[in-house]
Image: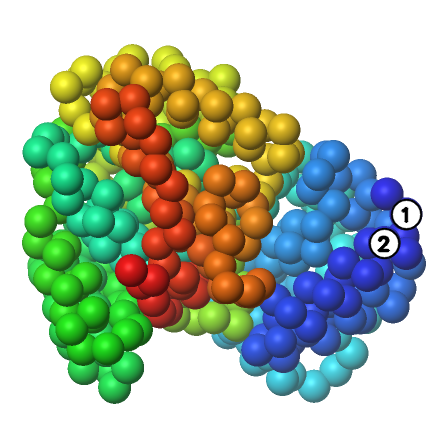
Amino acid sequence: MDLARLEGWFRRFADIECRDLPMYHRLCHGVADHSDLLERLLIAAPGQWRPNLMLAALHDIVLWDPEVPLARWYPTVGGAPDAAGDLIDAVRSTIETHPNRFAELIATRSTQTNEVNRSTLWPLALAAATADVDAEVALLEIGPSAGLNLRFDEYDIRYVDSSGGTVGRFGTRSSPVHLRCEVRGDAPTVRHHVESTATVPPIVARIGIDAAPVDLGDPDQRRWLKACIWPEQIERHERFDAAASHMVRRQAIDPLTLIRDDALDGLFDAVERFPAEAHLVVINSWMMTYLHRDRRSAFDRALDLLGDTRTLTHISAEGEGVESWVPAGDGPTDDTVVGISRWRQGVRSDQRWALCHPHLTWFAPLD
């Protein structure tokens, strides 16, 4: 990995991903200006030379030691993104305060997010994916991290229209986790999709496969997952904190099965744990981009094999072009694309079904 390429990644990340995050925008451009800081990322595992890995490592240290110089810019520990002072000097000083810890995080960790508001997608998508199947659902998530989104029906989900008015609810009203998503479109379209969530069939079993599943009962693992959430987005942290605490309580009573394995290597073993008569629904969100293109293709072929012998649906929410099977739209988009593949009696059909914000602040059906 050459530094010039890494510098370009930091600048693009700043201008695209962090354009609405003033502190992270300045931090990424500042790191890009200093080769000694860029070099700190070179010890990361192959494929992990990403700006968000360094950002997460810095955030983890701030959460672990709120007395470091950088903490004054982080709202998650009482700081302010517009605090006075030299932000990049503070980055360097913070790394130098805990050099071994920073190096270990960069060398051994990977970025993991569990944006719980993505749970608002699954009732809408499952309603569409199961409309033609009269069976209970066996739900398999690829890359679930801590598994928060596998418990989507345990949250209080509120769907709103463009004016912010509530048009429907889903889930558990008494839940401590409150989520919100704007459904875009004309009134009949919005009403149809929101009302369809009432038809989501029972979930008979839930399993997740992740290369590094997160145990939220472990303070270090929980802090790392929180560190991967951008510190300037306080509402995301509030949602995560509520969902993480809920997960810890629920795991003690009704634990989810989270399998530590590769998405492809663990697929068939996971499927064997499900009832054969259940409708197998495989879901993934913002995960396939981390798999090499060849592995993505192999995973899709594996689903084809499964679809030859059982009713199967695959719902995928990824960036444009990440899933090669999703039909192209009228033009390129920076929005997340939701695709649905269905296997019915061995026959496959692929659909470009919706667009949405990466954190499901809004959802726009295409049908």
Which residue is denoted by mark 2 in the rendering?
5
User: Can residue 95 be seen in the rendering of this structure?
Assistant: yes
Picture quadrant of residue 289: top right
For marks 1 and 2, give the CA distance.
6 Å
- Looking at the rendered structure, the secondary structure element under dot 1 is loop
What amino acid is at disc 1? Asp
Circles 1 and 2 in contact, beta carbons < 8 Å: yes
Left/right placement of residue 255 relative to residue 16 reads left
Query: In the displayed structure, would residue 288 be above or below residue 280?
Result: below
What amino acid is at disc 2? Arg
Give x and y (percent) for residue 15. 69, 72
Picture quadrant of residue 110: top right
Question: If the image is split into quadrants, where does the C terminus sit?
Answer: bottom left
Say which residue appears at 78% left-offset and 78% top-offset: 86
User: Can residue 100 be seen in the rendering of this structure?
Assistant: no
Frontmost residue, 198 versus 176? 198
Query: In the displayed structure, would residue 112 be above or below residue 71?
Result: above
Give x and y (percent) for residue 97. 76, 55
Which residue is denoted by mark 1 in the rendering?
2
Give x and y (percent) for residue 213. 45, 32
Say which residue appears at 30% left-offset and 35% top-offset: 342
Question: If the image is split into quadrants, where does the N terminus sit?
Answer: top right
- Looking at the rendered structure, the secondary structure element under dot 2 is helix
Left/right placement of residue 309 relative to residue 142 reads left
Say which residue appears at 37% left-offset and 13% top-offset: 269
Query: In the displayed structure, would residue 332 be above or below residue 147?
Result: below
10 Å crowding of disc 2: few (<14), some (14-19), many (20+): few
Give x and y (percent) for residue 37. 84, 57
